[in-house]
Image (cartoon, rainbow, N blue to C red):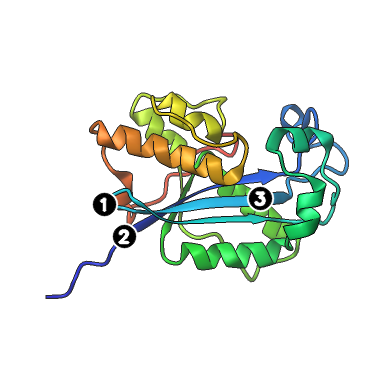
Amino acid sequence: MKARKRLHAVIFDLEFTAWEGSMEHRWSRAGEHREVVQIGAVKLDAASLKELDAFEVLVRPRFNPELSDYLVQLTGITNQALGARGVDFITAYRAFLDFVGEAHLWAHGRDDAILTENLKLYGWEGTAAVPAYSNAIPWFAAQGVELKGKHACDVAEAAGAAFAGRKHDALADARGVATGFIALIERGAPNPFLNQGLAPTLGPLGS
């Protein structure tokens, strides 16, 4: 009898270039782009919910290579750190795809759109695609956890669990979203990672 294929889920988070007022203006001011500067992710066994692996990479933005003081204070990512270990977006993205493999992607909000935006910004939209993706916000809403106006780093606490690490660090935030999922599933919520053949839930771009 053929063994059932092991299912995995990857929960990820992004940090991207921003300035004071960027969110309010939706990055519409001259010269502002949401260039990815960090990708963080954890891979979970869909059934046991155990973390199997983790991924983190810093990314050097091209259009605004110098991070704003606002972003440095928010994320703790310094220009010195970017210079020392940052890589180009497409290098980081390919490494991320290798990490994801055949797993289904989840994130708080529409981080898939940010990845697509960066692929287009750098001229790679025809050669690379975002894997199957679901926005976690609708699932949490269905469990009675309202995340509107909140960030990935708020998910664990909104679900009644503890957040560990530095907020607005992509890997810590990804783990925080995973912690929120696990806390609710362990209390009886349906495990969405076991039904990943279903059509992905995206939600609005403004989530």
Marks 2 & 1, CB-CB < 8 Å contact: yes
Dot 1: element: loop
| Element assignment for label 2 | loop
Is residue 144 placed above or below 78 in the rendered structure? above
Horizontal relation, residue 18 to residue 97: left or right: right
Q: CA distance from mark 2 to mark 3?
A: 26 Å
Task: Determine contact: label 2, label 3, CB under 8 Å.
Answer: no
Q: Residue 47: which numbered mark, if any?
A: 1
| Amino acid at pointer 1 | Ala
Residue 136 shown left or right of residue 66 in the figure: left
Image spot of residue 53 (x, y percent): 44, 58
Compute the Cα span from label 2 to label 1.
7 Å
Q: Residue at x 82, y 57 (%)?
A: 62
Quadrant of residue 162 in the image? top left
The outermost residue toward the bottom is 1
Q: Nearer the viewer, residue 107 or 200?
A: 107
Quadrant containing the C terminus in the rendered view: top right
Name the residue that disc number 2 marks. 7
Total marks drawn?
3
Which residue bears the numbered disc 3?
Answer: 38
Residue 189 horizontal side relative to residue 150, left or right: left
Check the image and report above or below for 17 versus 164. Answer: below
Q: Within 10 angstroms of label 1, few (less than 14), some, or many (20 or more) residues?
A: some
